[in-house]
């Protein structure tokens, strides 16, 4: 299990001078109940979760926050008097890093590449936050279609105005969708350290308008070829490190039950 979370939380907690330890624990599928018992007995303040536990934890929770309800997944649990409270800071972390980079999703046209777990969370969050148009392009278009259907299913409840559409990953589709977006976001593992595959043709980036923002959820390497190409062509870029830090800050705010100056902390930790 490789996780940067202990390092990232360590940085945030050090910055706050908080005397907490953040460790990683491997819990197999089906082992959650046993882990919860030991965490409660051991006085653990809270814990983060990765898949499949993000969904499996839900029956064990006393309460669940709005974002966790919205995404049907929990990435942060706070233990209070032996009861478990669930939160989701995944999309909030990305939104924080976007805003720290001067990008507000409200009224924007956004193209998301990939339709996996993270894409589904952030597309829903962008829709709820007032994005104008969200296009999800994926190798398996049905998965992108499912995310659009999910957004449509909560449209009335959350007053969502966003137009949503989906498509495949063919270069012509990428080119035609890139043409009219304010932000192009890579939410696939293409170009990530340790992953064999990468974008073979980045010419769709040439179709972006000059002021389009280009973001990648990947933070290793620091700059994927996707980001390098976009930067060389004059676009403002952002990698996924800020999202990682943002998630950690929002989770630590929950663990410490303390309102933090999130922007100041982000600036100090990201540097
Ligand atoms: P996931 O659920 O496995 O989804 C991966 C997506 O990428 C799927 O839509 C998949 O398409 C697509 N994909 C994979 N290989 C591809 C290829 N060779 N060509 C075209 N498309 C391909 O992953 P995830 O959990 O959503 O994570 C997505 C990315 O976000 C990863 O790079 C991950 O490292 C990054 N991430 C960053 C942070 C952060 O804090 N910065 C947090 C979480 C994740 P199919 O549907 O066709 O399989």
Image (cartoon, rainbow, N blue to C red):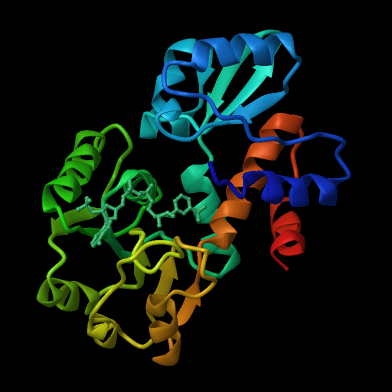
Confirm whether residue 194 shows in the render: yes
Closer to the camera in the image, 6 or 181: 6
Image coordinates of residue 145 in percent, x first then y, are 14, 47
164 vs 70: above or below: below
78 vs 199: above or below: above
How many dots with numbers? 0
Quadrant (top left/top right/bottom left/bottom right) for the C terminus: bottom right
Residue at 68 percent across and 11 percent down: it is 40
Residue at 36 percent across and 59 percent down: it is 189
Rendering quarter of residue 168: bottom left
Image coordinates of residue 42 in percent, x first then y, are 74, 14
Image coordinates of residue 141 in percent, x first then y, are 13, 53
124 vs 107: above or below: above
Confirm whether residue 61 shows in the render: no
Residue at 89 percent across and 44 percent down: it is 17
Is residue 148 left or right of 267 when viewed as pictured? left
Image quarter where ligand 1 lies: bottom left
Extreme residue in the bottom direction: 233
Image coordinates of residue 195 in percent, x first then y, are 38, 62
Closer to the camera in the image, 261 or 205: 205
Residue at 51 percent across and 70 percent down: it is 221
45 vs 88: above or below: above
Closer to the camera in the image, 45 or 163: 45
Is residue 82 left or right of 177 when viewed as pictured? right
């Amino acid at each position: 299990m490789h996780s940067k979370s202990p390092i990232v939380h360590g940085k945030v907690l050090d910055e706050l001078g908080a005397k907490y330890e953040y460790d990683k624990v491997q819990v197999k599928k089906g082992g959650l109940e046993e882990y919860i018992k030991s965490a409660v007995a051991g006085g653990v303040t809270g814990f983060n979760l990765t898949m499949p536990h993000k969904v499996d934890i839900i029956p064990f929770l006393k309460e669940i926050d709005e974002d966790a309800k919205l995404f049907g997944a929990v990435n942060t649990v706070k233990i209070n008097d032996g009861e478990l409270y669930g939160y989701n800071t995944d999309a909030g972390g990305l939104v924080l890093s976007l805003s720290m980079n001067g990008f507000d999703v409200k009224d924007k046209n956004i193209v998301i590449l990939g339709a996996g777990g993270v894409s589904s969370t952030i597309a829903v969050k962008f829709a709820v936050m007032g994005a104008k148009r969200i296009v999800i392009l994926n190798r398996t278009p049905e998965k992108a279609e499912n995310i659009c259907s999910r957004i449509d299913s909560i449209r009335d409840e959350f007053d969502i105005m966003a137009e949503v559409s989906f498509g495949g990953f063919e270069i012509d589709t990428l080119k035609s969708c890139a043409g009219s977006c304010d932000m192009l976001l890579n939410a696939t593992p293409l170009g990530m350290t340790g992953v064999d595959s990468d974008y073979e043709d980045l010419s769709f980036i040439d179709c972006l308008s000059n002021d389009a923002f280009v973001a990648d959820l990947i933070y290793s390497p620091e700059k994927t070829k996707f980001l390098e190409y976009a930067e060389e062509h004059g676009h403002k870029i952002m990698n996924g490190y800020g999202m990682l830090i943002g998630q950690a800050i929002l989770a630590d705010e929950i663990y410490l039950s303390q309102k933090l100056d999130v922007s100041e902390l982000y600036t100090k930790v990201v540097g």
